[in-house]
Image (spheres, grey):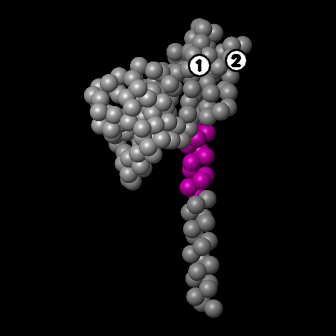
Amino acid sequence: MALLEGEAEIIQAEVEAVLQKHGVDSGKLIPILQDVQTRLGYLPQEAMLQIAEALKIPEVEVYGVGTFYNQFRLNPPGKHRFKVCMGTACHMAGGKIIMESFERRLEIKEGETTPDREFSLERVACVGCCALAPVVVVDEEVEAKVRPTRVDGILLGFEMQKKASEKQKRQETGAEKQQEEEGREQ
């Protein structure tokens, strides 16, 4: 995924801070990766390359650790996160169909983030709401007995919210311009 403007500098600075804290001991690779992810929200490729260079270990070793443990994210989290439960009850009640519905609508796969970084899609083992299966956690809100039409409704809600926010910004900008013009007239 492409970096946003100014993001490379932020990544470099955060990795430097973590390396200063832990030192350049390759035995501390996992805690270093954990701290970098805590600071950045994920492990960007640029960070892993910087860590490999500082610890004087092959890049593939850092990448191997980052991909081996499921605690590490290689994609930036979206502004809004969808966690589709795939525990036994949710899986049996249609969790796979719900995941496929999100993938189709968002045009991303499980574990990915939309290019605009608005949404990310994750698979989780169990959220502990088996009686409500299939379950999706939207940001931190539990959606129960989700069907493909509900996936459409959830995403439509975000689209409407975004449009309302954009409209409000345009109105505020218009009001500010009107106040400036009135101020100049006086």
Q: Main secondary structure of the magenta part?
A: helix
Residue 141 in view in this figure: yes
Query: Would residue 158 be found to the left or right of residue 128 on screen?
Result: left
| Label 1, label 2: how far apart the Cα atoms are | 9 Å
What kind of element bears circle 2?
loop
Instruction: Indicate the amino acid at tag 2.
Output: Cys
For the C terminus, give its image quadrant. bottom right
Q: Which residue is mark 1?
A: 85
Residue at position x 52%, y 17% from top? 97
Total numbered labels placed on residues in the image? 2
- In the image, residue 178 sits, relative to residue 27, either above or below, namely below
| Percent x, y of residue 175 | 62, 71
Residue 126 is tagged as none
Query: Would residue 167 be found to the left or right of residue 32 on screen?
Result: right
Residue 106 in view in this figure: no
Report which quarter residue 116 is drawn in: top left
Query: Would residue 147 be found to the left or right of residue 50 on screen?
Result: right
Query: Would residue 43 be found to the left or right of residue 90 on screen?
Result: left
Cβ atoms at labels 1 and 2 below 8 Å apart: yes
Residue at position x 46%, y 24% from top? 110
- Check if residue 78 falls in the magenta segment: no
Q: Which residue is mark 2?
A: 129
Q: Residues within 10 Å of mark 2 (few under 14, many from 20)?
A: some
Instruction: Indicate the amino acid at tag 1.
Output: Cys
| Percent x, y of residue 143 | 66, 26
| Percent x, y of residue 184 | 58, 88
Q: Earlier in the sequence, mark 1 or mark 2?
A: 1
Q: Nearer the viewer, residue 117 or 149?
A: 117
- In the image, residue 125 sits, relative to residue 35, either above or below, namely above
What kind of element bears circle 1?
strand
